[in-house]
Image (cartoon, rainbow, N blue to C red):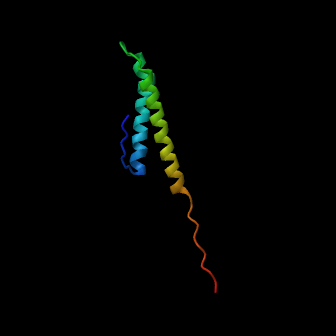
Amino acid sequence: MKKLTMEFTLEELGVLTNMASDQLFRKQFIDPKMPGFIPIHDELNLCKDVVGRLRSAVAEERAKTDRPVKAKRAESR
């Protein structure tokens, strides 16, 4: 499988993750109730993995940006 690298802001990645999560929910719980639906389990598992990776990336970046920055104390002479 060929890899692709793209850059996103934290906000862009967050909304993309939310949208992908909503589509995963649809694919997992709503689509199977539609007449003629044929499940593709490998694709569903791949979707779950990708959404999980996106959520982890967003959580890691938010944790980095939410940490308070320690101010350096001025050295007394």
Q: Which residue is at 48% across, 45% downward?
A: 57
Residue 2 location, x and y as percent?
A: 36, 37
Q: Is residue 24 above or below residue 15?
A: above
Badge count:
0
Residue 46 location, x and y as percent?
A: 44, 30
- Which quarter of the figure is the N terminus placed in? top left
Q: Is residue 36 left or right of residue 51?
A: left
Residue 13 location, x and y as percent?
A: 41, 45
Q: Which residue is at 53% across, 56% downward?
A: 66
Identify which residue, 42 or 39, lies in the foreground.
42
Residue 8 location, x and y as percent?
A: 38, 49
Q: Is residue 77 left or right of residue 39?
A: right
- Which quarter of the figure is the C terminus placed in? bottom right
Give the quarter of the image for residue 40: top left
Spot the residue most to the right: 76
Q: Which residue is at 41% across, 49% downward?
A: 11
Q: Is residue 65 above or below residue 42?
A: below
